[in-house]
Image: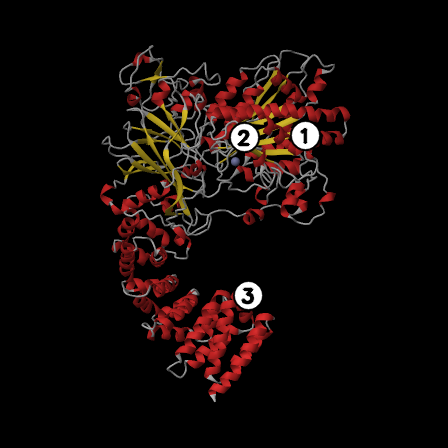
Amino acid sequence: MGLSVNGVFGHVLEKTRKEVASKSSGGMEIILSSLENTQDLQTTLNILAILNELLTVGGGCRTGVFVSKGGTALLLQLLVGSSKDPPANEELMLHIHSLLVKVGLKDRKLGVKARLNGALNVTLNLVKYNLQNHKLLLPCLQVLRVYSSNLVNAVSLGKSGTLEIMFEIIGPFSKKSTTLVALDTLASLLKSGMNARRAVDRGYLPTLLTIYQDWHRNDTRHRHVVIRKSILGCIKNLTNIKLGRKAFIDANGMRILYNTSTVRKCWIKFHFMCTSIGTCQTNDDIETDINKLRPIQMNTRPFDELRAYEYFFREFSENFELHRPIIIPTTPSSLGPQNRRPPQEDLLTPKPDESPLELDSISISKRPEGTSDPDLVCSLGRLVLDAGVNGGSVDGPQDEGGEQAVLEVPDTAALLPLHDPDLYLEMVKSTRSVPAYTEVGYPDYFGHVALNLREPILERVYGVQRMKIFQDIERLIHPSDILDKVVYDLDNQSCPVTDNGESLKFNSKFESGNLRKAIQVRKFEYDLILNSDINSNHYHQWFYFEVGNMRPGVRYRFNIINCEKSNSQFNYGMQVLMYSVQDAINGSPHWVRTGSDICYYKNHFSRSSIAAGGQKGKSYFTLTFTVTFQHKDDVCYFAYHYPYTYSMLKMHLQKLSALRTAQIYYRQDDLCVTLGGNSCPLLTITAMPGSSSNDPISQFRSRPVVFLSARVHPGETNSSWVMKGTLEYLMSCSPQAQSLRESYIFKIIPMLNPDGVINGNHRCSLSGEDLNRQWQNPNAELHPTIYHAKSLLQYLRATGRTPLVFCDYHGHSRKKNVFMYGCSIKETVWQTNVNTSTCDLHEDLGYRTLPKLLSQMAPAFSLSSCSFVVERSKEATARVVVWREIGVQRSYTMESTLCGCDQGKYKGLQIGTSELEEMGAQFCLALLRLKRFTSRLERHNHNSHLLDMETDLIETRSIPNITSPTTYVLEEDEPAFLEEVDYSAESNDEIDPDLEPDLQDNHAPQTPILTQSSAAKTHLTEIEPDSL
Ligand SMILES: [Zn+2]
């Protein structure tokens, strides 16, 4: 009977199968309904067989239909129902599980549904009692793997003894197919901390290591990399808990994994994470609120409040005819806005020497011709300011002899017209630093002459990162090689206690210096820790320090281990900068790009949640580089980028003011006093009123204003070098420079953040804030430079002199070339793809002219890197605020690379100070050409003419042209390189709260505890600046 019924059903089902195959989901409903209603085992089996066939052939789409019609629940009910009277029919179980495996690919809720239906243990028991029945075991395991991907299921399955069963399966002599599935299941189960603890308690970690070694030993042809990877996955999940890490170390895990991955060079990618930043992420940042893109017509400040700023625009009221040539005071005056403080006398008085250190001072002399003394530098004490009674001059000439060394000063006067060592020392004396520095960095004192050599962007050697990480791991493998000796520590002034001559000497106690601690890890390897910005827990990136007591010809490895940025141009060919005092004395006073084996990678130090801005488990990054010193007894300096101190700026300004001629109007005011008690210079440069014009004074007063600023971010020293180029050009005597001065009145704030620069910050001011995020609502007390700079602009606007151009010079750490960010409503709206009727947005296209001119004139400049999109995250920056609130249409930030260029004349080269200075000069020339377009405006006094002109220039009548250079620029423009090793993996980012302290425990005991030290305020922050 059964046969005939089956025969009938078989016929019916065959027909249905055809219908289902040809038509839509109607057939599936019929099948499921038949399955639900039949009580007959054989019929059920037949239907299941058909379904299996259907879902196999039909692929994902048909499985989707199956799931949507309630097939999953039906299968689970069938599974649980038929398990009630054992023994279960094997064929039935086989069919159900085969189907569930397919369903698992489509139904993300299978695990939850299985638990709610009570199916978890049915499958588990089947596995348990069919360990030798491979045919049934495999599909059941596969289903179990799906179940265990749900964390609640994993806990439940763990309690039911699943771990133990999995370990039985992955043992010796089991089939590879079942082993792999069991390992995957195990890895999922071990994501639960409870299961992980259970596994560690049962001693499974050494078992896993042994299994791993077995597979590694026998898998000589790399056929089973997947299995080895799965075992590693299990081990990794176990080490997410503290107990697991201890068991791992106790079981010699580091050595086992180290040996298995180095002895045979198996280049498995250990990388589990994708670090690239997608477009969608950055798109969120584009401003979509049209009202926030329109200019604000607000008069928030009464003019009476701004009237005080008239003082800074005296050129507009001066009567030049009365006394020419006029002498314009450049010394700071005590006049000015009411809220300037403190009195100037106080500012200029050198601070008494508060240094707790007893330091030798030095004498300075010119070296007799032809002599050479290699031990000279060695015998030098530090270059220390003597701020004593005699006006603080460096100790007098060599007649004192005896203990004091003689310092050779390289003669750079001919090459560096703006540099003067004596003047530099004078400037340093009036510079106020939080730690009250009394020393001076030699490079800043001697001066830097741009290297007349090409410095190519380094080709990165594949495998460097892997090699460096293995060296890091070897610290645990060969602990006897590890010294872990603290050789420099700002937190502990008595360090180092002893000096056996075997360690490098470090120092960073000078202006712009940044190095907090140095640990000699191995004989020729040092871990370095940077200071955070003052009054902040982060922004570790800028470094500038001195190294002495080196051995020549030895490869020293330096690791800066608390960097924060997730990527760096150090991964794309950028080198660090080094300055050798020996070389300087011998006639080569250069900062030189140096270092090999450079890479930048995530390390195993976790940032405390305070330092990570509340985010848990963020890691630090290591910048590693290797250097071989040339000279014995040299003193060398390392820096993130070409240093440019505040004292250097003051020296340059003094030298520049001396370049004044009868034609040049140059005035230096103090805009305000910073929190740290330093003055912020404001320059006014233009041409003296000419006599050629009918009414010279009126021509003078009608010149448009160009407003420039730089160095709001202290770590972006390149912006200061660009600014130096601009200033030198503006003070030069070429006819174009004169023409430029006759065209504009330049208002320039060359350093918006003097305190940050002086104290070696990377990003912030003394208030611990990023000053370029304060422009919307600057506080006169906390952000004085921004407050007064904005006030100047508000004054200009209120008096009808809104600047023609505003540009804030910056540096960019992750991109190449020099480029600009501007502001355009249309281009912003266009990028968001919001269907706003853009036709009613009238926008002058003039903002594109200057970048376009620069791309034609300046070799380092790249138009394709420019962007005119207004981002939400940038709404409080100078560029956006000056554009919206002051109404400056040509409001820019100009970003200069820290690395080099990938286009133009300097393609493939790292950038140097001469290229940066050239950029600053070219910016001036571009302004001169811009004048030709804008002066037409004056003559015709009609806006459309200017528009036509500029539109012609930019060659594109329809803006924006999406394929054109102005597409939105991503934060990270570099493609990920091939070497994606990330040995800290994602374990850091998981939930385990005891992760952080334990990672440090695993590190050698004497190394610094980063989470603690960065959470604690630096010793610098504990010293209150007296003006605060
Ligand atoms: Zn910046």
What's the CA distance linking mark 1 and mark 2?
A: 28 Å
Compared with 239, 539 (above or below) is above
- Mark 1: give few (<14), some (14-19) or many (20+) Cα within 10 Å: some
The answer to which quarter of the image holds residue 315 is top right
Residue type (three-letter) at the residue carrying disc 3: Cys
Residue topped by disc 3: 61
On the image, the x and y values in percent for residue 115 come to 45, 72
Between disc 2 and disc 3, whose residue precedes?
3
Residue type (three-letter) at the residue carrying disc 2: Ala
On the image, the x and y values in percent for residue 433 come to 43, 30
- Say whether residue 524 is visible: yes
Could you tell me if the residues under marks 2 and 3 are in contact, i.e. CB atoms within 8 Å?
A: no
Residue 797 falls left or right of residue 15 = right
The answer to which quarter of the image holds residue 690 is top right
Residue topped by disc 1: 953
Residue type (three-letter) at the residue carrying disc 1: Leu
